[in-house]
Amino acid sequence: MNSRRMTVIGPEASPPLDVLIIDDDAASAEACRRILEEDGYRVAVAGDGEQGLRMAEADNPSVVLLDPEIAGVAGFEALGRLAEAASATVPVVMTGKGTVDSAVESMRLGAHDYLAKPVNPERLLESVRRGVELGRLRRRAHAPRMKQDLLLQALALLEEAYSLGMGKRTLLEELAGLETEAKRHAQSLGRTWDKGRAIAEIREDLLQADAIMRSYGFRKNALIQTLLDVQEKFHWLPRHILEWISGRLDVPLREIYGIVHFYEAFSLEPRGRHSFQVCTGTACHVRGSSELLSRVSAALGLQPGQTDSRLTYTLETVHCLGCCALAPVIQIDSDYYRDPDRSRLDKIIKTMQREEAQA
Amino acid sequence: MKRLKTVADLEKLRAEAVAQRNAKDWLEVCTGSGCLACGAEAVADALDGEIEKRGLGHKVGVRRTGCHGFCEGAPLVVIHPSDTCYTKVQPKHAAPIIDGLGAGEGPVRDLLYLDEGTGERIERLQDIPFYRHQERVLLGDNVRIDSSSILDYIAVGGYGALAKALSEMTPESVLHEVKKANLRGRGGGGFPAGRKWETTRNAPGEPKYVIVNADEGDPGAFMDGSLLQGNPHSVLEGLILGAYAIGAAEGFIYVRQEYPLARKSIEIAIEQAREYGLLGRNILGSGFSFDVVIHRGAGAFVSGESSALMSAIEGRVGEPRPKYVHTSEKGLWGKPSCLNNVETWATVPHIIDKGADWFRGMGTEGSKGTKIFSLVGKVKNTGLVEVSMGIPLRDIIFKIGGGVPDGKSFKAVQTGGPSGGVIPAALLDLPVDFDELTKAGSMMGSGGMIVMDENTCMVDTARYYTSFLAHESCGKCVPCREGIRQMLAILDNIAAGKGREGDLEILEELAEFMQVASLCALGQSAPNPVASTLKYFREEYEEHIRHGRCRAGICTALIAYEIDQEKCQACGACQRNCPVDAIDKSEAGVFTIVHEKCIKCGACLKACPAKFGAVVKVPAGAVLRKSAEEIGLAGTSR
């Protein structure tokens, strides 16, 4: 998370962090981070108390998840200092030593909630959800004071814009354009996220697109390679990223769309998390790939090229996977199957559905 | 330091690498795409585990190699140095295989290749008929090399040709040797590589570029991908030799997007070659400098064409341009650029190493050396095959390939991919080389060889390639774009039983026109699949048009599935497998197909147990007539 922030171009203006985890048990911290990130939260981890307090001050997270048993600055002391800082941050304690004493002590020092380790994912999410909500209310209460900070950042931006010969109006228009893109993008994915979350998300996307372009030295002739990397990362080419690349590399958008339409590897539609690729190479064709394709198509209820509305599966055809001895062959995610029959396919699909349901 | 500064350094390293190899027995597990798909990685892991368990690490090693070629036997394991070849190996065989290494145990008989003709098990790789009739100059090393190890390549003599060229030969003499060998481009056209090199060398303009075309787009062909994946250094060494002869300082490798394994393999190879000083500045102390960049393709068949491929490397849409001036003179960024395919480059080190005369000793008058084919389709031994030019087609398909499986009869073989054509049984004794295949109305192409049996429909085959080309035509020139589209429309009609008299004549006229008027080779050769099937199998087209009959039972509009009410045992396998619930129980208690719902996917035919054989394919007309009869019967009974 932090390394990504280093790539910010211009003044630091990160959207607020949702959760900061302060825990010296890396495995436990990582598990919590994964659970929270899968639910869309922006999470950072600190390995000890000092670092944690520093990050809490710098990043101003909505919620801090803290294990008071950590080494270094004693956890309870850290908790106390967090609560005293009178910021909008909401502290939540999680500990492996679930004694009544520690619970009472935590609450006395200002913890908002108390979780026992190993943490139950549902309980964790519930606690963080309430914490973030509370943080937001507190932040609003602090808004008048924070507005001044925001204005300082905005002034720095404006100064930079003027020095580049860019007017205030242009800057605001561009910004409004990006916000519209963010909303459109969230809608196109069927998400009901709020404004802030949608903007945070496309900002993250654009930073990633920048990182990809940077790896090619922002060279125009690396456009196809850049697009391939974006496709690999996102599984499709969202419009806001293409517009961003167009601006960054100074290549007309229509030229980018020309390339995207020309090559098979690119998709302008979101793709499913699982890919079904039926090989229609010649060897597969003469050994009955069209029968296999109609079987797979019927099993998924999708035509080739389609993705289901929940973005679970994408069905595609591909010209030659290079394992003609297995013909007719289908590649499902990274596994190859030789002419699977209906019941085999059903079994594979059911397994996927079960995994999706668990996730 | 790893970096090799002189030829002597390389030879010293080679001696070390050879000693290391000889210290152990090796279990060479094929991890080509076909074997991987059959679980080769699990086999290799199991062998590793078994060796560790027994503490044999100092005596036996597992080597994960590229494609061995005999994909039908996947997953394959070969023992070095005994050359014992095991087929269809599963992880559970790890223990017996390692037992078999011990004195007195002997090989695991059940895993040896079974010769169906003689009923005997064959132990050694080179005695298996599939391998025995081949001449594996390029592919042979695939069995012996872990592609991620430059030491493996060096141990089998790798970079010896480069050392020889840099220390003993001038660029002119390298070029002369390749010209003398009469090496023709393996990518399709068969243009003499030496002449191409010379053009680029002599063309005005600096810098000059050398390019590897690894955009193997022909469906059904996977030799370039397998070579690049299994032996990437051979391609790299060939490219460096070419750059030396031509005077290029920078090279590009354009890899097809669908080949992630090959890309990874060549990436590692380049990295290692740089570390060892075989790429970069002052290679082996010769003063010659050269480096390579990988460019990923993004999935477009036409981008394999030289001018299109160069556009793509420049970051633009990969469309061909008119070639009034060849790319060898004005190519990448307008500079002289020499492009050859993977196999061509990989052949170069062998020519420099063993000499042009050795190379000329193989092949025919016009086509020297060996050629790799991917032998696929309706053939028993699917796989990669390398043979001397001039070998009869019959030998490839029957001696090496083992003929057509399931007792079916051979109908035709398609060569040259979407730009090639079909060759009928009558021409099976044709010697395979560039010129003979072209004379027969097909072409060498990159080396795809798809065998077709009596159950392959020729109209469908032509339609398949034409629809592939319709999708892949870049649309820049009218003859190709519109010609292919019209051809496809006519073929669609014929396959749907809506063909008309005169259709075949229009197809022929279109074909002739496109061959003359298209901009690039894609359009010029696009009519070949139609023209050649028409030439040799005209009667099949006529049957489709006049009688609505597809003798191979492939064109779905002309066939139907039926359940023989007498034979059906009501096991329900067909119903369970039908994806669209088009199978009902009839009054007699057995199953019957509801034709209105049937999508003709053939799942029921596949599901019906062979011992019953109740589901059958019938001409669509038979179903229509029968329902008419049934209606008639119903009428009379009332």
Image: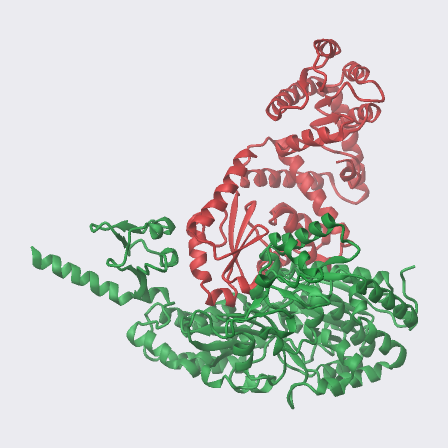
- Which chain is in red here? A
Q: Residue at (55%, 40%) from the top-left corner?
A: A189
Q: Is residue A175 left or right of residue B279?
A: left
Within the image, what quadrant is residue B556 found in?
Answer: bottom left
Please tell me whether residue B31 is drawn above or below residue A196 in the rendered image: below
In which quadrant is the N terminus of chain A drawn? top right
Q: Looking at the picture, how far across and down is residue A55, in whole percent?
A: 80, 27
Q: Is residue B231 visible?
A: no
Identify the image quadrant of the C terminus of chain A.
top right
Which residue occupies the foreground of this view, B142 or A238? B142
Q: How many marks can you see?
A: 0
Q: Position of residue B374 (x, y in %)?
A: 58, 71
- Vertical side of B331 occupied by A214: above or below: above
Compared to residue B618, the image places residue A174 above or below, namely above
Given residues B456 and B25, the one toward you in this image is B25
Residue at x 69% of width, y 57% of height? A225
| Rendering quarter of residue A27 | top right
Pick out the residue farthest to the front: B104
- Residue in front for this viewpoint, B494 or B507: B494
Q: Residue at x 63, y 83 (%)?
A: B389
Q: Is residue B28 left or right of residue A49?
A: left
Q: Position of residue B121 (x, y in %)?
A: 57, 69
* Residue B423 visible in this rendered orientation of the protein: yes
Colour chain B appears in: green
Position of residue A355 measured from the top left corner of the image (x, y, whole percent): 54, 38
Q: Is residue B57 above or below residue B369?
A: above
Furthest-bottom residue in this view: B365
